[in-house]
Structure formats: structure tokens, C-alpha cells
Image (cartoon, grey):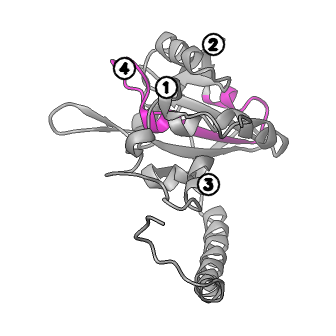
Amino acid sequence: MQTDHPVVSRQQWHIAREALLRREKELTRATDALARDRMALPWVQVDKSYTFEGAQGPQRLQDLFHGKRQLIVYHFMFGPDWEEGCVGCSFLADHLDSAIMHLRHHDVCVVAVSRAPHDRLAAFKARMGWDFDWYSSAGADFNFDFGASVPLADGAVEERSGASAFFRDPDGEIFHTYSAFERGVERLAGAYNYLDIAPLGRNEQGPHFNLGDWGRHHDRYGDAARPGCHGQR
């Protein structure tokens, strides 16, 4: 056996596991309480008009709801002059399509918004094989107003990964209910939850969404996606 990790008897493992389980249950209860507090946050009415460019042409913010009462916008980092989307945002976006069918059933629409021109978004979306709706906010204030794009002192703009939630009432009024950025949205990437219970964890090096040696656009994994874990024997 070649490992530096502590190895104990089954009885000793159960004692250690029970101690950790008590902490996990405390965290679960705290997370549930935080979710209730998140839902209780006050809302802000959106009284500004925003226009986006999508596959069907110009769209207003109310159009992005697609008939649902709730909208979640994923702020995908893809600047106006970028050649491809952010690796970390792409990692999260790989989870969207499988979730959308369930979210629609719960009256929630999810879309992505970036500042890059729509034709560049569409090309990258086709390359990645995604189906979710992705809109360009190029030339609009949307990203800046909701904290996804931040002007810097030198004139540059910092792009931030995040998500914003909106509610539309029966009169068509729209309210901003919640926003989170960076590690605040990593819960949307389900693969992280698997890695958190894997023996070696996330294999991250450095800041959020610096995904270690395996973190790259999924069409660039190459030999990193080794056979034997997907139906092969």
C-alpha cells in the first residue's frame, strides 16, 4: 500500500465518520435557514428597459421569461473581444441543459447573458453542443447595472461569473430578487458536488474556477478523459 493518508480499523472509521456527520447535519440545517432568509430578501422593481440580441433577434427582459414567472440569468463571462468563453463558466454551463427541463416544470426559466456579440456566442454554443438560450447584452447597461461587468480605473472592464434572479408579477412588472457571484454560484455546477465526496476532492489550484489540470473546455480534454469509467470494461 502506497499512501500517506491515515488508515484505521472499520470501528475507528465509524467514530470519525459520526463526528463529521454531526457537523454535516449542522451545515445542512444552517443552509436550509439561509435559503429561507434568501427567499425573504426584499425585491427591487426593474424600471429600466433592456434589449438583448438572441437567436430570434432583439428581445426585451420580459421576453427572456418565456412565459414563466421566474427567471434566472447566468452571467457568463465572455467579453466583447474574447475569442471563446471563460473556462469556469463553460464548466458550469455544461450542467444547464440537463437542469432546464426540471426548472421549467417549476415555473423557472434559465438563460445565459454575455457582452460578446451574439454571432460569437452562437458559434461557441454550437462548438460546445449546448441548447440553452444565450443572449448578448452588447451595447446595453444590463451587465453593469447588475454587477456582472465592473469598470476599472484604467478604463478596462472586469467580467464576473454570477447569476441574477427575477420575478414577473401578473401585471408584467419585473423585480430583481437576488444576485450572487463567483463562489456564490458554484452550487450550480453539480460536478463539484461529486468532487466534494471524492477521495482527492476538487483538485483546484488557486482562485475560484481555476480547475486544476483537468479544468478546460470539455472539447479539449483529450486523453484526460480516460476510458474505463463510462461503460467500458
Residue 55's disc is 2
The residue under the point 55% across, 82% down is 8
Mark 3 nearby-residue class (10 Å; few <14, some 14–19, many ≥20): few
Identify residue type, mark 4: Pro
Residue occupied by mark 1: 222
- Give whichever of discs 2 and 3 has the lower sequence position: 2
As measured in the structure, the alpha-carbon distance from the residue carrying label 2 to the one carrying label 3 is 34 Å
As measured in the structure, the alpha-carbon distance from the residue carrying label 1 to the one carrying label 3 is 21 Å
Write down the region rendered in magenta.
61-90
Q: Mark 2–mark 3 contact, CB under 8 Å?
A: no
Looking at the rendered image, the disc whose residue lies closer to the viewer, 1 or 4, is 1
The image shows residue 170 at horizontal and vertical percentages of: 80, 42
- Give whichever of discs 1 and 3 has the lower sequence position: 3
Identify residue type, mark 2: Ala
- Helix, strand or loop at label 4? It is loop
Mark 4 nearby-residue class (10 Å; few <14, some 14–19, many ≥20): some
- Give whichever of discs 2 and 1 has the lower sequence position: 2
